[in-house]
Image: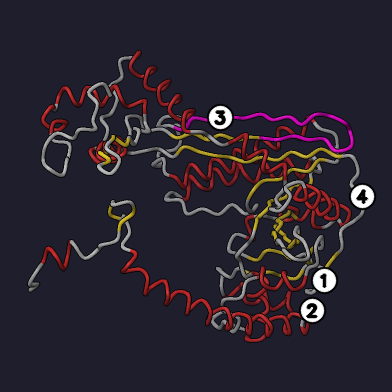
Amino acid sequence: MFAKPADSLYNANKCSINGDPMPINYLNLQPQISQLGSSATERLQQVNTRKEQCLVVLHQFANKLPDLQKLVEEQSRQNKSLRCAKPFSEALNAHVACPAEVPPCVILAADGSQITPDPHGAVFYGLINVGVFRMSLGKGEAPQTNTWSDLVYEDSDPENTEYISEDLISLKRDVFEREIMATLVKQETAPILTFTDGPLELYHEPRNEQVFRKHFDQYISALQELALQETLTAGYIDRPRAALLVTLLELAVTSTPKEHPFAGVSDLDLMKDLLAPGERSALFTLQSSSSDKYPEKLALHFFYLNVGSATHPAIARVEIPLWVAGSTAKVDLIQRVLLDQAAQSGAHPYPYALTRAHETAVVKLDEHEYLDDLIQKELLARGVPLAELSEKLINKLVGKRTRYWDEHNSHRQIITFQHSRLRGWLQAQRADHPSFWANAAHPAGRAHPGIRPDL
């Protein structure tokens, strides 16, 4: 079919960087990039027009709270998956200035990181690592950090027969964060504020509903404990992309969730125009398919907050439970503290305490490798054989390990092998399969000059 298959199929990409073929065919992509730019320009103009229309509707319905509340309740009964903002107690277009002072208080910020089980690795396990940063405002105490680590493996929970998936690890991490907070607040004196990165709403797609229900019940118990301690708890969502308020406004003008006259417009677009630096939006109730799972004082609410400047607005969504939303003083305190925290991050406003919690929680590569070593040594000491690495992982690692001959500079350019813990294993493979290593994919078909025999 092709007169010159080699030229037409394999030599068409003439682009290179320092003589090496580029991994991406930029010649193919350039027309697509141009089209992307053209489409983005048209879409931006369209979204801006819709945003202006949406703002008009926002001000038109700003004080019609009872009507809108009734509308959301009716629509949610017909559509269980409806997800939108529901008016709470303030005008839709409210923009509330920040209170002046912060009383002495304690801030606890938590963030989690995880190791997802690798089905191609020698040991199948997961890790949840939660870091907590504590700082006391107005008391002259030095900040403190601590970590809590939990290993997840096939027999770690006898009641759970669910495959240890990334989703399950994430679910357990969210619950673990909240349980740690609920324990720590008992040691503090009010007022106490707890912050976590991300929403308070626990959203996952588990394969086993029974497993999810078990962890969700634990999550609710932790929230109830925080409520019992009168803790001001909040979830912080940086640069949210949701259209919760926009969906409410669409319902107001169409009375059906199937029509989207403001498609493409996000709440963030509205808030950039509505909120001055330091201001928060009105409070809203979060209407979602899981709303009834957060009863009474646990019911989820939210507001938007501009932590940026006049020239660079930075909008965050702050989720809070009803026991916080129902108190103006508590909402004011959260607003003031978050603004002060974000200001400490300079040109990229984000709560300082959450940044420190993330730094505390993150699992570095060398720590991951050391944990692998500890687990493998424990298993071998007990006579438990390790699983063989999958062929897929072996080939990936060999690819990272390959060394290339730099013909332009007449010296070997080394791309180091990133997984040092597997060098011994690779040595054994080389001994068992000498022909594999003797023909290490050199372009000329001979042994590659860049592979050292001592690695």
| Distance Cα–Cα, label 3 vs label 2 | 47 Å
- SS at badge 3: strand
Question: Mark 2: which amino acid?
Answer: Ala
| Distance Cα–Cα, label 1 vs label 4 | 21 Å
Does the stretch in magenta take in 284?
Answer: no
Label 3 or label 2, whichever comes before in sequence order:
2
Q: Is residue 73 among what the camera can see?
A: no
Please report contact status of discs 2 and 1: CB closer than 8 Å, yes or no. Answer: yes
Q: Quadrant of residue 146?
A: top right
Q: What crowding class fits label 4: few (fewer than 14 Cα within 10 Å), some (14-19), or many (20 or more)?
A: few
Q: Which residue is at 83% across, 55% downward?
A: 331
| x then y, percent, for residue 423 | 30, 25
- SS at badge 4: loop
Label 4 or label 2, whichever comes before in sequence order:
2
Label 4 or label 3, whichever comes before in sequence order:
4
Read off the residue under disc 2.
62
Read off the residue under disc 3.
149
Question: Mark 3: which amino acid?
Answer: Ser
Q: From the viewer's perspective, is 34 left or right of 340?
A: left
| x then y, percent, for residue 134 | 74, 34
Q: Which residue is at 77% across, 72% downward?
A: 274
Instruction: Magenta stretch: give its range.
Output: 132-152
Label 1 or label 3, whichever comes before in sequence order:
1
